[in-house]
């Protein structure tokens, strides 16, 4: 086994994934933990990163001492939050070296290997972005004012739909009934929930939308269609800004691609690799290993 190991981390608003590899790209282990967005605070993000990392070590059959020879590229949501980068840079981490970027950046690195191209992220949040040459971004200003087409936005719109059925403004169906059942069919419970609900909380409702759309629920289908149209707008905005090719990434990518206008879906390219591969590439770039 090569002396140096490489860890790629993709920390989003819903989950944190980590992959441990040898210098020549042999996958040793992977791990998954809870949300790792810096919007939840440094402690939450750090703990999620380390939980996923330790799972990868366990799968690889390696002791935690192996982190002393591991170089980590760590992508996290919410790095634009005031004080986030300062907290990360002051972390007395256990790695031989660690570098921190936004989750969108490592997703872009993975998608194009650092080459020309842009990505549209459809996950807990949404954004269109490219970093080659200079940074170009579209949307992604944060839920609820932005992030249209994201899991959080989809969950919010599903909740709005469910509440409208209580008023008789629209017909109830399987989706609305499933959502209201989570709140004991009590709008007061909904109001209490939204007072503290995060983007991640709203994104959990998106799962109900995809499930009921697959069962033929018209409202769920329409919500996914609306979300896909927003994601398509992000892609076209990147094309209009001169980005030559665009890949769709994120937890909702495959679901929403099926609802996109065919001419938009046809213009999208497949990403070369995922965000964890992007994190590993970041670490290798930093130590001159590529």
Image (spheres, helix red, strand yellow):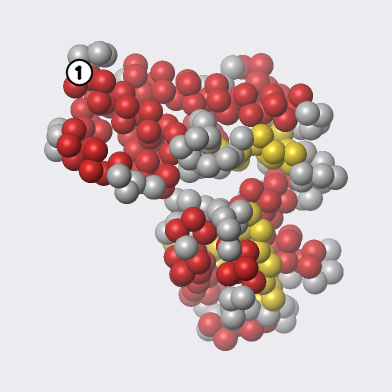
State the image quarter where residue 216 is shown.
top left
Q: Position of 183 compared to 70: left or right?
A: left
Q: Secondary structure at mark 1?
A: helix
Mark 1 neighbour class, 10 Å CA radius: few under 14, some 14 to 19, many 20 or more: few
Name the residue: 57% across, 40% down: 141
Between 21 and 92, the one lying in front of the other is 92
Instruction: Give how far across and how far down residue 132 sits, in percent.
Output: 81, 45
Q: Position of 232 compared to 158: left or right?
A: right
Q: Position of 233 compared to 152: left or right?
A: right
Instruction: Give how far across and how far down residue 262 sits, in percent.
Output: 61, 17
Residue 16 in view (yes/no) = no
Query: In the rendered view of the protein, which quadrant contains the N terminus?
Result: bottom right
Instruction: Give how far across and how far down residue 278 sits, in percent.
Output: 69, 55
State the image quarter where residue 276 is shown.
bottom right
Between 12 and 273, the one lying in front of the other is 12
Q: Position of 112 compared to 90: left or right?
A: right
Name the residue: 50% across, 35% down: 145
From the viewer's perspective, is residue 73 above or below residue 91?
above
Report the residue that reaches farthest toward the front: 82
Instruction: Give how far across and how far down residue 113 sits, in percent.
Output: 77, 50
Which residue bears the numbered disc 1?
Answer: 167
Name the residue: 39% across, 47% down: 198
Query: In the rendered view of the protein, which quadrant contains the C terminus?
Result: bottom right
State the image quarter where residue 44 is shown.
bottom left
From the viewer's perspective, is residue 223 above or below residue 153?
above
From the viewer's perspective, is residue 13 above or below residue 160?
below
Residue 184 in view (yes/no) = yes
Name the residue: 55% across, 21% down: 229
């Amino acid at each position: 086994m090569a002396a140096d190991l490489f860890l790629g981390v993709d920390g989003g608003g819903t989950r944190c994934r980590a992959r441990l590899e040898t210098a020549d790209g042999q996958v040793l282990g992977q791990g998954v933990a809870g949300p790792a967005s810096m919007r939840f605070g440094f402690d939450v993000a750090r703990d999620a990163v380390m939980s996923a990392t330790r799972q990868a070590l366990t799968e690889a059959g390696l002791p935690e001492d192996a982190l002393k020879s591991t170089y980590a590229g760590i992508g996290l949501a919410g790095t634009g939050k005031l004080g986030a980068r300062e907290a990360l840079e002051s972390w007395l981490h256990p790695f031989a070296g660690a570098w921190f970027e936004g989750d969108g950046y490592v997703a872009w690195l993975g998608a194009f290997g650092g080459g020309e191209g842009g990505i549209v992220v459809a996950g807990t949040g949404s954004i269109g972005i490219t970093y080659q040459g200079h940074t170009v971004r579209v949307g992604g200003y944060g839920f609820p004012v932005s992030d249209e087409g994201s899991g959080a936005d989809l969950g919010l719109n599903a909740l709005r739909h469910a509440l409208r059925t209580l008023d008789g403004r629209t017909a109830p169906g399987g989706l609305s009934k499933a959502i209201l059942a989570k709140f004991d069919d009590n709008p007061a419970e909904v109001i209490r929930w939204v007072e503290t609900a995060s983007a991640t909380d709203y994104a959990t409702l998106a799962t109900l939308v995809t499930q009921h759309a697959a069962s033929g629920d018209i409202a769920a289908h329409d919500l996914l269609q609306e979300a896909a149209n927003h994601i398509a707008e992000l892609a076209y905005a990147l094309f209009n800004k001169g980005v030559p090719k665009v890949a769709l990434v994120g937890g909702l990518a495959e679901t929403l691609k099926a609802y996109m206008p065919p001419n938009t879906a046809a213009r999208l390219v497949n990403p070369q690799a995922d965000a964890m591969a992007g994190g590993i590439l970041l670490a290798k770039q930093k130590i001159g290993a590529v």
